[in-house]
């Protein structure tokens, strides 16, 4: 019988149901499919092959399956490491992605990742990113098999200004690629907490309508489990089930913090899991309970996660780590033996991705997705045949990706004798570096300016440029009360009482200004729930002009809602010092001679200070107007009988 190719005389590790190994085996390929596998002596005489590859001293195994990655993120590899997940994501990845992720960068960065993955013996990967059309196009050109999930979330993404656009892109993408021989289009709702119930329901509907996989991050960190619970009131896997997400060909990524009940639910729903040990360690998310998942019968594959959080896409390394971590965390050396680790990286990944009818093992009828590795090399020597497990030990614990010699997908050689046949590495690396150089300049500029860093995390408003203010010591509230009855004063708003906790992020270079994080707790009367508002304000420093009775500050003021923690801002802005000022404030908005002022009666609790301060201030966009207001402040000091000797023209933080 005439065939296209025969690989013979290697150790054939099939990863089929019986885990058959042929010590001197052969694999026969015709029209991209495996047509025979068995002992070389049985097969070699029966086929006339166009191309014969002698695999003596080598292992022929199923190609590795990278069950979760974000391939275009190779563009961002090594950009910002050793950071907490939120700082890494919101401070660096998202701002750079907004600026640089486009069709071109996704295409080249995908080619780079594909080249890297082929070299480490990968024949199939599951991706989640933006411009998935480009990811699919690049993977297809290179010849790799890929599940390409267009990422959808409630926030604007680099390829969609709104969720509606994302959804449209996703639908168009799936319709365009459905049925392709290498590319499986898929839907990728980012995670429960970055989506809404409507998005999750719609994604599930789309996945079912087109019968395509659905890929979603699940329970990666304790923080996102908590966030999901707060949003939906139940454990993440259960809320996904409520929205119909688990009724698709679903792959849940990470699962680090899944409960026993959630794992059981995933088994029942036949959901796959992608375990990403390096990424979980690097971002300090924790370690997924993989041994327990396997015990319960979950379909678990292994993924590298994106190259920005790994930082490579080396599946040999990932497989070894998966085996070792499971032992270390369970204190059981029998947990995840090498055989199981290799299963997860091959047929397990195919099952998790619902692709096991096509790839993942060397079996007749499956596509010829194969990896051939050299094992007669120094660091894998010697060899034993004591047990069938010896070969798995050699592959998982000793083999390096550099030992990969040939890689085939659909029977087509993508790498032969370590030479990549479908990608030009020089061109790709040059293109990616060209884009990276621009990212470099962008971030270097941003790091020089607090304002740019603040802008990068979004939601900024530009407030009044000028502020006139003065403070004076007063005995107590009675002073204010007496002043307020003055005929020229009318109260604009009813007074409020608040506890303000300010943290000032200060920088050695004072010309940069400083950042104030304020937690403003409005105290309600009659035991009402206090309202807490958190803001972030960047102010310039220094005074513009001093008057006898007040000071004019000229400072651009930018403010935004502080929707992240103070810890986040400290790690993101890296101030030289942080000063805290806590005060109890009674505030009146008054109108004096038709001009609006804020009158605050403040008692400092940190640093503690005897007595109270009366602060009068007003803000404006105009310097002329500010000067007018400074004159009126002089009059107001008399109205409130403030002793001129006690005047302070500084902010509390400067005391
Ligand atoms: Zn991911």
Image: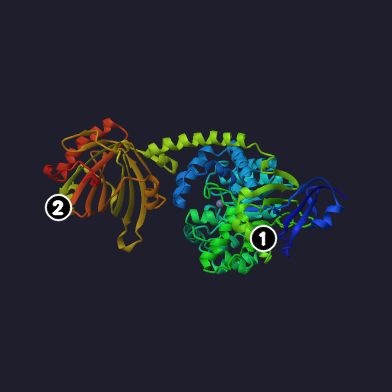
Residue at figure coordinates x 71%, y 45% from the top left:
177
The answer to whether residue 353 is above or below residue 331 is above
Q: Nearer the viewer, residue 19 or 527?
A: 19
Residue 38 appears in which quarter of the rendering? bottom right
Q: Earlier in the sequence, mark 2 or mark 1?
A: 1
Say which of marks 2 and 1 sits in front. 1
Q: Does dot 2 land on a helix, a strand or a loop?
A: loop
Coordinates of residue 642 in the picture (x, y in percent): 14, 45
Say which of 417 and 520 sits in front: 417
Which residue is outermost to the top? 624
Residue 522: percent from left, percent from top: 32, 55
| Image spot of residue 512 (x, y percent) | 32, 37
Left or right of 45 in this view: 475? left
- Tell me the crowding category of disc 2: few under 14, some 14 to 19, or many 20 or more residues within 10 angstroms, Cα based: few
Exactly how many numbered labels are in the figure?
2
Residue depicted at x 34% and y 58%: 530
The answer to whether the residue labelled 2 contacts the one labelled 1, judged by CB atoms less than 8 Å apart, is no
Q: Is mark 1 within 8 Å of ligand 1?
A: no
Instruction: Give the x, y percent position of residue 194.
Output: 52, 52
Mark 2 sits on what residue? 475
Residue 391's disc is 1
Q: Is residue 156 left or right of residue 140?
A: left
């Amino acid at each position: 019988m005439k065939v296209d190719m025969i690989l013979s005389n290697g150790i054939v590790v099939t990863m089929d149901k019986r885990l058959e190994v042929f010590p001197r085996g052969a694999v026969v390929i015709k029209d991209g499919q495996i047509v025979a596998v068995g002992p070389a002596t049985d097969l070699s005489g029966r086929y006339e092959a166009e191309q014969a590859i002698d695999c003596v001293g080598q292992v022929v195994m199923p190609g590795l399956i990278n069950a979760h990655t974000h391939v275009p993120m190779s563009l961002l590899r090594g950009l910002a490491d050793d950071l907490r997940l939120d700082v890494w994501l919101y401070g660096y990845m998202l701002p750079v992605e907004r600026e640089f992720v486009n069709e071109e960068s996704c295409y080249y960065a995908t080619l780079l990742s594909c080249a890297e993955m082929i070299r480490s013996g990968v024949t199939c990967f599951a991706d989640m990113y933006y411009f998935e059309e480009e990811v699919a196009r690049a993977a297809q050109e290179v010849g790799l098999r890929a599940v390409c999930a267009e990422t959808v979330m409630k926030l604007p993404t680099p390829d969609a200004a709104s969720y509606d656009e994302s959804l449209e892109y996703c639908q168009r993408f799936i319709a365009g690629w459905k049925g392709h021989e290498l590319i499986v289009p898929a839907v990728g709702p980012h995670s429960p907490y970055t989506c809404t119930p409507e998005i999750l329901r719609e994604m599930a509907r789309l996945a079912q309508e087109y019968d395509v996989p659905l890929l979603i991050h699940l329970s990666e960190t304790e923080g996102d489990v908590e966030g999901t619970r707060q949003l939906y009131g139940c454990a993440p896997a259960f809320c996904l089930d409520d929205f119909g997400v688990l009724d698709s060909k679903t792959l849940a990524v990470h699962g680090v913090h899944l409960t026993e009940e959630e794992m059981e639910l995933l088994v029942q729903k036949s959901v796959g899991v992608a375990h990403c040990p390096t990424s979980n360690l690097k971002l300090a998310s924790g370690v997924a309970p993989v041994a327990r998942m396997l015990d319960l019968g979950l379909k678990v594959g292994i993924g590298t996660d994106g190259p920005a959080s790994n930082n490579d896409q080396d599946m040999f390394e990932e497989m070894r780590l998966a085996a070792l971590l499971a032992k270390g965390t369970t204190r059981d050396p029998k947990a995840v033996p090498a055989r199981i680790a290799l299963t997860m990286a091959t047929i397990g990944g195919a099952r998790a991705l619902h692709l096991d009818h096509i790839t993942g093992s060397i079996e007749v009828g499956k596509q010829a997705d194969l990896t051939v590795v050299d094992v007669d090399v120094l660091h894998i020597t010697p060899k034993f045949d004591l047990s069938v497990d010896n070969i798995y030990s050699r592959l998982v614990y000793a083999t390096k990706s550099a030992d990969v010699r040939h890689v085939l997908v659909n029977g087509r050689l993508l790498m032969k004798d370590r030479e990549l046949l479908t990608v030009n590495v020089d061109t790709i690396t040059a293109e990616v570096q060209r884009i990276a150089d621009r990212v470099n300049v962008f971030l270097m500029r941003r790091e020089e300016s607090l304002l740019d860093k603040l802008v990068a995390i979004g939601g900024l408003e530009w407030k009044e440029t000028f502020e006139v203010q003065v403070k004076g010591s007063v005995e107590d509230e009675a002073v204010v009360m007496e002043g307020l009855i003055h005929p020229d004063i009318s109260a604009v708003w009813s007074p409020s009482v608040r506890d303000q906790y300010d943290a000032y992020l200060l920088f050695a270079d004072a010309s940069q200004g400083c950042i104030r994080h304020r937690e403003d707790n409005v105290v309600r009367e009659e035991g009402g729930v206090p309202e807490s508002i958190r803001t972030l304000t960047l102010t310039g420093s220094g005074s513009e002009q001093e008057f006898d009775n007040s000071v004019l500050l000229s400072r651009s003021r930018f403010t935004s809602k502080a929707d992240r923690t103070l810890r986040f801002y400290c790690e993101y802005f890296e101030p030289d010092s942080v000063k805290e000022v806590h005060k109890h404030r009674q505030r009146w908005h008054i109108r004096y001679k038709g001009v609006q002022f804020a009158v605050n009666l403040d008692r400092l609790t940190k640093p503690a200070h005897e007595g109270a301060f009366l602060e009068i201030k007003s803000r404006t966009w105009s310097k002329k107007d500010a000067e007018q207001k400074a004159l009126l402040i002089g009059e107001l000091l008399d109205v409130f009988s403030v002793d001129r000797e006690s005047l302070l023209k500084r902010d509390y933080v400067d005391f």
